[in-house]
Image: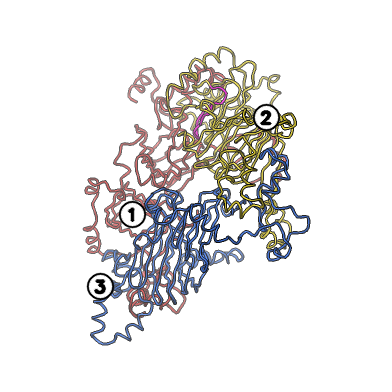
Chain colours: A blue, B yellow, C red
């Protein structure tokens, strides 16, 4: 049990839990305001509870701290920080009583590491403890269940990412997103949350976010990500050491740079605003995303039948900008019949479909 | 007389003053927008005027500057910064006339220090000058008095911290606070202002601010403050010099650290958000506070009968978190009959009260 | 053609252009949200197009980047950043076709510099290309003209700085300004835009901005600028090297410092908030300004008949602050009959006007 001295946003996955008085399930998202005292209980006997947590520090950027009312092997109770004098006056009680009830027994030997505990009968608890079936039942009774929650509309209640329709959806994937514009809690933080499902063998088409920096977490599955940056970004670090002899030349001649990453469960990737990315799933892939600076963000796709910035460029400008003629550019764009998600291995598909009928059928089905 | 190139928030104490056209008194708070040309006059013959001033720089964080229309021994008039040429065109007058009327005579010897002035008949004025009774009367006539102000509701007018009821009050102390939610001027700045009175021998109970960083100024009295931090904060500075050999070990084993301070008049203390503090008064103590980042801030008390985060924890969680049973924790919390402010020396009290009757009486009186 | 990964604000000058679907003319101002794909076409056969562009980075302050869908000699297409694999799946097409239509031919020799292009038949386009009369006509047809725009009131449309009345205007100059308070697009960015015309031989009177940092661009003409700063600002840099021996002395004794600049076309000057400036035109001078942090900014003039902070100071404070008496100060201020803009060479004027009649006449005309 800790209180976080920061704003915390949680996405809960894969099992049921209780927090304060909420029974939570997969896709539930909750904002814990800075300074909230909170705990999490995994109610499920079989499944692990996994939570993605975006921490927004209130004191100093990049510096997060949490304080605990109750001490554990990992961290003292904050009550330990006050003098006996102050504690006795605060509780109007003798220090021995306060220590017995609130504080673990102060040790005089060096602190023990986790795992030694059972054998030594230390008073210190672990930060994560075993909860009995009865205790879980008692906590569950006081918590609002998901169905009750949906009736009320209180601002501080959790919302489920998957209750809304996906913003993009086809046979190759689904994109769930809640934005600051749609949700007051997210609005206060200027943050969006998303859950992206890319089916095995599918591709999230190349796109960029206009304003938001996106933190992606691989929740399940495997895949590949390609991110396009400018060469000058890479050189920046190198230039710290080297002389900047060729600066002028480099400025005039900006080459793009491909950043590739193999993705697997637990990976975290930060996507800066404006940088084009594409993600390919080698097994069913589930990504969780936090969009920072998300207000008025627009996701601009660079390929796909609909919702594609290239197709919106005016004819004479296409003609002048690209090596191909405007007709050739339009024909190329139209050869992709999917939007947002597509087949990542079209060459294999097309081999199967070869023959005049199959290709006609293919365009009818999709 | 200066204009501040910053937003300035002033709390006036202990005497009457005039600013622009306001007669101010103890507890009056006023926001001077950046770029305001302002002066302060102490109207009182006997009492010193004391002002607590929170400066919010507009150009660069942490960098405050003020410019003066009139020169003084401490600082040139900004008119001195313009060339003769520009000044003559600006005022449509000869430079000699402008210099005679607006600028002190330019010196050719090294500048004199304060204190030498009288004897040398320098043209330079001090930054603080003697005002005649007649001049004070003339300024006072044009200023709105407190009673007239209260009728109007203009946004730019001063407000008095003590006109509202205290948010916490009992025999041991009073806590006055105006928050961004209650006042438009403070809302623009995201700042709260407070005045805390802790009676001699009393304690402001342990609590933390959920979001706000609080700058405390000791206005009057003496006392002690305890602030709880994490050991890792202290180590940070030490680690700059030392090798970070034991980092992993320290991370797993966070101890709390007590920062203690004896308080006396003029002391300034910065309380980071989320850090528990308690304040004990050894003589009647008056603290002024500026809360920075104050919107939606919550003050969470850790002891006291009402308004106490520990008592709100659910029974099974108390049981699991603390060494004592849930009943013991509840009994301990209930032994303090006060909220927010309490007796700092309960042991002395209880000695006086010893005997069955006095303890019953005590619980009835309070 | 680029998309900017930043918010961009453009002021168009001196000729007609098309952007997306807008025909723009002198004084038109447009906000391009971060991530917009945009192009500019100069429709005029004779006149150059000049644009002042304020870039607000979304990822890191001070770090601007733009990405191009189409490659040029200066920068690769962002499609180049994706692997063949991803491109083929994204467009559902063979790589050779994509390369032929969207990407310039990859070179195997070192890249050529601009200017060599024509002779070598490179596939690479310049970032700025020649547009045929027919292409301009086609683009112009789809664009809304200025007159049509004025009817509608869509938020994302350009507005013209010169459609409104100038905020200051007399025989010596004109000051056009649109502030966040008056325009929603500017409000989102907290930016003001201004266009200042100072006639040959005229002076923009000394003034300071209360909150805004102003970036001034000299669009046309020549002149001089004087900016008043505090000596301590200058010393800061020097003190990095030197010992700070005399710090106490310097703090008590702040002298103002004059920063002078001769202005000519293309110069950019940053004016920090609160710092007094004056600008003199030696030929007709046109300045464009971006005010950053512009909400609630006030321009405070230090000379001139109306709108002058010095004349607003109360009588006894004038008496106490300045070497001259309050009457002398008032008389000095009143000798300037102009406000905001004035004659920069009054001595020459007064020689011409010498004689009782001319001075009476002068005060009647102006």
Question: Tags 1 and 2 in contact by the CB under 8 Å rule?
Answer: no
- The label on residue A347 is none
Q: Quadrant of the C terminus of chain C?
A: top left
Q: Which of A327/B68 is in front?
A: A327
Tag 2's secondary structure? loop
* Disc 3: host chain: A
| Quarter of the figure with residue A289 | bottom left
Left or right of A103 in this view: A278: left
Q: Which residue is mark 1?
A: C49
Residue C279 position in % (x across, y down):
45, 38
- Number of on-image labels: 3
Q: Which of B149/A117 is in front?
A: A117
Kindly report the distance in space between the C-alpha atoms of the residues bearing marks 1 and 2: 54 Å
Residue A90 is one of the magenta-drawn residues: no
Residue B14 position in % (x across, y down):
61, 23
* Disc 2: host chain: B
Kindly report the distance in space between the C-alpha atoms of the residues bearing marks 2 and 3: 79 Å
Q: Which residue is mark 2?
A: B111
Q: Which of C244/A78 is in front?
A: A78
Residue at 29% across, 75% down:
A335
* Image: magenta residue range: B24-38
Residue placed furthest toward the top: B134
* Disc 1: host chain: C
Select label 2 or label 3 by which is in front.
3
Residue B296 position in % (x across, y down):
49, 42
Q: Which residue is mark 3?
A: A327
């Amino acid at each position: 049990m800790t209180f976080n001295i920061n704003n915390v946003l949680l996405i809960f996955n894969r099992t049921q839990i209780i927090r304060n008085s909420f029974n939570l399930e997969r896709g539930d998202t909750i904002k814990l305001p800075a300074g909230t005292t909170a705990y999490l209980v995994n109610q499920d006997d079989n499944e692990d509870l996994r939570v993605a947590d975006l921490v927004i520090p209130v004191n100093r950027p990049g510096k997060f701290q949490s304080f605990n009312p109750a001490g554990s092997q990992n961290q003292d109770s904050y009550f330990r920080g006050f003098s006996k004098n102050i504690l006795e006056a605060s509780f109007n009680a003798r220090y021995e009583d306060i220590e017995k009830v609130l504080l673990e027994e102060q040790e005089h030997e060096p602190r023990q590491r986790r795992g030694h505990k059972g054998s030594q009968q230390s008073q210190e608890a672990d930060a994560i403890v075993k909860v009995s079936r009865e205790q879980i039942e008692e906590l569950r009774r006081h918590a609002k269940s998901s169905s009750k929650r949906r009736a009320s509309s209180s601002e501080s209640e959790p919302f489920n990412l998957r209750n809304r329709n996906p913003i993009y959806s086809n046979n190759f994937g689904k994109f769930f997103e809640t934005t600051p514009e749609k949700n007051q809690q997210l609005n206060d933080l200027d943050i969006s949350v998303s859950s992206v499902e890319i089916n095995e063998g599918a591709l999230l088409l190349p796109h960029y976010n206009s304003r938001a920096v996106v933190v992606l977490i691989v929740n399940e599955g495997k895949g590949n990500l390609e991110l396009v940056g400018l060469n000058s970004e890479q050189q920046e670090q190198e230039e710290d050491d080297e002389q900047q002899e060729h600066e002028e030349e480099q400025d005039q001649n900006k080459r793009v740079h491909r950043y590739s990453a193999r993705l697997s469960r637990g990976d975290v990737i930060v996507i800066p605003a404006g940088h084009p990315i594409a993600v390919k799933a080698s097994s069913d892939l589930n990504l969780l995303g936090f969009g920072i600076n998300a207000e008025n963000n627009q996701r601009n796709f660079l390929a796909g039948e609909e919702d594609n910035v290239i197709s919106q460029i005016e004819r004479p400008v296409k003609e002048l900008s690209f090596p191909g003629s405007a007709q050739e550019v339009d024909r190329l764009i139209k050869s992709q019949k999917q939007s947002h998600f597509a087949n990542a291995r079209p060459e294999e598909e097309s081999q199967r479909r070869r023959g005049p009928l199959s290709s006609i059928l293919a365009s009818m089905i999709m």
